[in-house]
Amino acid sequence: MDQVRDAPPSGTVESDYEAIAGMRYKEMAASKGKPFPFKHAWAILQIFDKWKLRDQETAPKKSTMLRMDDSEDEEGERNLGKPEGTKKGKVRVKMEGEASSLREKMEQMMKAREELTTKTLETKLLITEKKKEVKLAQVEAKREEAKRKADLEERMIKVKEAKVWKELMVEEKEHMMMSKKDMDQEQLQWWKDYKEDIAERKRIFRVASSTLRGDAPMSCGGDGGVEDSTTGNNGGA
């Protein structure tokens, strides 16, 4: 890539450099006609200082290195098919070992990244499940609170009903205990009308109470009348 960048072919633009460098790499004897296998490694390593410093070298030094690369390629072509010397064989073994080590490190990095991604997803799923559990608990707590309030209101209503009913019964008893011996016709008529008024209020109260509770009308022994103290009948004259 440095060779192409320093001396780009005529009529090419920067977006063509990678493809041209790939073709030149495949033409090298050492590549055996295969494409450059470490593009994924370069995508990661290029951000490290070691490789950034390489791009900051002076032009003469960089050109010298490129010429050395060309010389090595030419020498490799001349020695193609010849048996390797001890020194060259060791260098080749060393380079292959370094390449294998780099490949293993890259595989380990990729595996670690996959494991981290998996753990992150698992953590997100766990958090989502916890949120659902908390939300369900909150809903259940609100439901229980609403039920408790409804029960309390129902008890309060029953207390009020009992109080009203008691007052009606006391009022009816006091009315029924009144002596009618000295009453004239007009007073007797008032006494009967008042008795009927109390009975009607009791009937209305029973209907209203049963409607609120959703059950059958409450029974209090007929109309809950009190015996007339003067006649022994239930409100008789």
Image: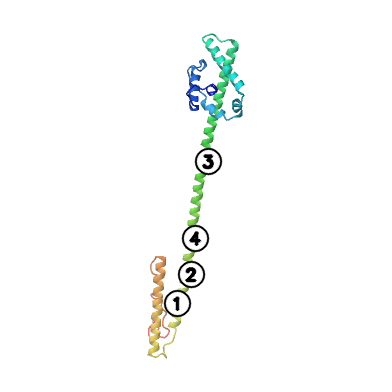
Mark pair 3, 1: CA separation: 68 Å
Read off the residue under disc 3: 123
Read off the residue under disc 1: 169
- Residue positioned 54% across, 15% down in the render: 73
Mark pair 2, 3: CA separation: 54 Å
Q: Residues within 10 Å of mark 4 (few under 14, many from 20)?
A: few
In this view, the mark in front (3 or 1):
3
Colour theme? rainbow
Marks 4 and 3, the one that precedes in the sequence: 3
- Residue 193, position as x, y percentages in the image: 38, 83
Q: Amino acid at mark 4?
A: Arg
Q: Amino acid at mark 3?
A: Thr
Read off the residue under disc 4: 148
Marks 1 and 4, the one that precedes in the sequence: 4
224 displayed left or right of 115: left
- Residue 5, position as x, y percentages in the image: 53, 24
Q: Amino acid at mark 2?
A: Val
Read off the residue under disc 2: 159
- SS for tag 1? helix
Mark pair 1, 2: CA separation: 15 Å
Marks 3 and 1, the one that precedes in the sequence: 3
Mark pair 1, 4: CA separation: 31 Å
**Badge number at residue 60:** none
* Front in this rendered view, residue 58 or 212: 58
